[in-house]
Amino acid sequence: MSKKLVAYFSATGVTANVARQLAEACHADLYEIKPQVPYTKADLDWKDKNSRSTIEMANLVSRPAIADRNANIAAYDVIFVGFPIWWYVAPTIINTFLESYNFAGKKIVLFATSGGSGFGKTVENLKGSVDASATIIEGKILSGPQTLENLKSWVDSLGL
């Protein structure tokens, strides 16, 4: 049986709720990816071309600082990485997280929350942030209410 971690970034709490449920469903440890500077409501205003999130997402090399590097990635075989979809991809803070640790040989399963869009080019955009021996699995959009049974069924279907 593999040791699992659910690591997540949540700007408004939606992804955090799903991550907690997922960790419970697959008996995983939980780790929050926190920005060094928390996002405000104004930072998240995607309609404002000068908002922090808009500026970060317009710059593919943007790497918002994370608050800590305390995740013990070496202790896990499978790492679920969760985030809200921003501009059809993962927020660039996910690249920061992935580039902060050694994921060589790890299985990374993505999950996301979204108001309606899919993963887009998320996997493609994240591959360069991890060792080539890491496997990134697109995973699933987990928007709306989730049940532990459905989450467990999804995790079981991955065969991890």
Image (spheres, rainbow, N blue to C red):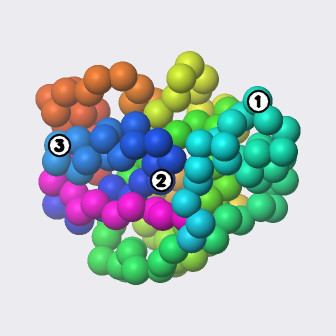
- Residue at 30% of width from left, 77% of height from top? 75
Q: Which residue, given by chain and number where applicable, does mark 3 sit on?
A: 25
Q: Which amino acid type corresponds to the residue marked 2 in the rendered image?
A: Phe
Q: Is residue 32 magenta?
A: yes
Earlier residue among tags 1 and 2: 2
Give percent across and percent down for residue 38: 55, 60
| Alpha carbon separation for disc pair 1 and 3 | 36 Å
Q: Is residue 81 magenta?
A: no
Q: Quadrant of residue 126?
A: bottom right
Q: Which mark is residue 9?
A: 2
Nearest to the observer: residue 51 or residue 119 = 51
The residue segment tinted magenta is 26-35
Tag 1 near tag 3, CB within 8 Å: no
Amino acid type, callout 1: Lys
Q: CA distance from mark 2 to mark 3?
A: 19 Å
Left/right placement of residue 106 relative to residue 49 reads left
| Residue at the farthest top position | 116
Image side of residue 18 versus residue 1, left or right: right
Q: Main secondary structure of the magenta part?
A: loop
- What is the crowding at mark 1: few (fewer than 14 residues within 10 Å), some, or many (at least 20)? few
> Is residue 38 toward the left or the right of residue 71 in the image?
right
Q: Which residue is mark 1?
A: 47
Give the residue drawn at x 40%, y 37%: 14
The mark lying in front, picked from 1 and 2, is 1
Question: Where does the N terminus fall, quadrant-wise?
Answer: bottom left
Q: Residue 117 at x, y = what percent?
A: 60, 23
